[in-house]
Amino acid sequence: MEVILAKNAGFCPGVKRAVDKALAYKDVPHTYTLGALIHNPVFLKRLEDIGIRSIEFDEILAELDAIAPKTMHLILRTHGVPKEQETALRALASESGRLDIIDMTCPFVKNIHRIAEENTSDKTAFIHFCHKDHPEALGNMSYAKGEKYAISSLDELKMLNLDGKIPILCSQTTENLVEFKKIKNFLKNLYTNAIFFDTICSVTEIRQTEATALAKVSDGMIVIGGKNSSNTQKLFALCKEHCKETICIESASEIPKDFPIGKQKIGITAGASTPGDIITEVLKLWK
Ligand code: SF4
């Protein structure tokens, strides 16, 4: 049996930067992440074990009072924060003098914030191809002015009436590239004034292409990553399209005992927020 690990699997540069920064705060009391730092429960448990816990936006004031006069260190995750929340946090930091904001928003996400802010007005309709409830999508949408729509498929786009507006299309960083191209082409044919921004991050693009190629030649595929990780679920859907025997797991213990039976070639890939040692654990099963 042959086991092949995709070349680009596990932490992407954006996640690695955020994770390294969080781990550097290991011995710093009152360090928090605003929401889950990454969508990986195994890693989140590790952070909790070293005293870094996740806090929600509406809990911050009370927590700041509770730890007074100490300083709160607050890590903003790669997905970014809605504009109103970030403005409120910066104001609180300057008023209190006890809120240290460590902004780990990925530069690819920051770029979407800038695009949304600088290119939208009451003349435009901002169309965001995204996973609607995902924190990144909520943040991206918050920067757009005028009409705005979050869509998750071409069918949803077809239901919109954009007459009289300039459509501005961009995508969540981890969206499906093939679907995005379909949406873009549809819009291009219908609205000559539409403006497009290709904002799927290059890391996501490479992973999806690589995972698809690997799934096509594998008898079984394993996708490792959090069940609530958008990019992991996109990889899973893509692999499943090309390899029926695809499973998605958070750790090695979830692999069904009979999974490899009769399979000649197993392909393995992992989402952008999957720690390297979890991938190694899976690989060890075949050593
Ligand atoms: S997947 Fe791309 S956009 Fe998301 S954190 Fe990684 S590098 Fe940044």
Image (cartoon, rainbow, N blue to C red):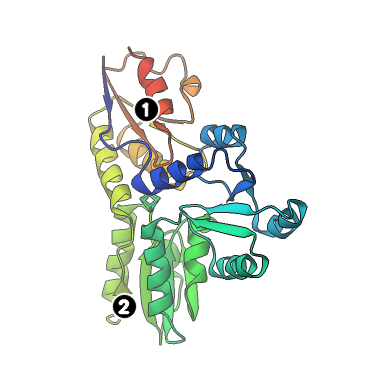
Answer above or below: position of 110 versus 285: below
Amino acid type shown at disc 2: Ala
Q: Is residue 39 visible?
A: no
Q: Position of residue 117 (x, y in %)?
A: 43, 76
Q: Residue at x 35, y 31 (%)?
A: 244
Residue identified by numbered label 1: 245
Answer above or below: position of 281 versus 15: above
Q: Residue at x 41, y 55 (%)?
A: 106
With 258 as the anchor, is 213 left or right in this view? left
Crowding at label 1, few (<14), some or many (≥20) Cα neighbours within 10 Å?
some
Name the foreground residue: 196 vs 59: 59
Q: Residue furthest front?
A: 69
Name the foreground residue: 7 vs 163: 7
Answer above or below: position of 112 versus 190: above
Instruction: Determine contact: label 2, label 1, CB under 8 Å.
Output: no
Name the foreground residue: 102 vs 285: 102
Q: Position of residue 37 (x, y in %)?
A: 52, 46
Secondary element at image label 1: loop
- Quadrant including the C terminus: top left
Q: Residue at x 28, y 52 (%)?
A: 202
Q: Position of residue 134 (x, y in %)?
A: 52, 54
Amino acid type shown at disc 1: Glu
Q: Position of residue 120 (x, y in %)?
A: 42, 80
Residue 194 image label: 2
- Quadrant including the N terminus: top left
